[in-house]
Amino acid sequence: MTDLLSDRDRVILTFEARRPGHSSAKEEAIRAELQLTPARYYQLLDRVIDTEQALVQDPLLVRRLRRIRDDAARRRDDRTAASAG
């Protein structure tokens, strides 16, 4: 049996499920509701979605977020390779 998510990790996943995407309104909500800077929120979210516990908690959300992150990294790598070549 996997350990449960911490309260903070669960709050972050729940928040992301309610407010997908990126917007200035979301950034304001991150500051107001979570008392975090947007940069810190996204660092924590990135760490949380890599855990097995998060995958168990909300598999659809976690898989979608991992796919979005991996696609963005792949695009960055492609641009870097193209500019180097």
Image (cartoon, rainbow, N blue to C red):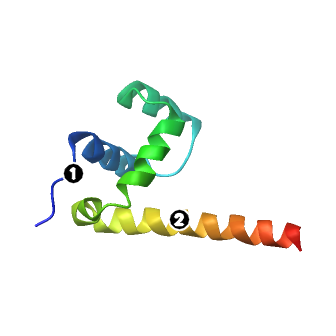
Image side of residue 52 versus residue 70, left or right: left
The image shows residue 57, relative to residue 33, as above or below, that is below
Disc ID at residue 68: 2
Q: Residue at x 28, y 59 (%)?
A: 54
Residue labelled with disc 1: 5
Looking at the image, tell me whether mark 1 or mark 2 is earlier in sequence order. Answer: 1
Q: Residue at x 62, y 65 (%)?
A: 73
Image side of residue 26 versus residue 75, left or right: left
Query: Quadrant location of residue 66?
Result: bottom left
Q: Residue at x 41, y 45 (%)?
A: 44
Q: Quadrant of the N terminus?
A: bottom left
Image x and y of residue 57, in percent: 22, 60
Report, in whole angstroms, how far the alpha carbon at label 1 lies from the one at label 2: 22 Å
Image x and y of residue 36, in percent: 43, 30
Image side of residue 77 versus residue 46, left or right: right
Q: Mark 1 falls on what kind of element?
A: loop
Mark 1 or 2: in front is 1
Image x and y of residue 59, in percent: 29, 68
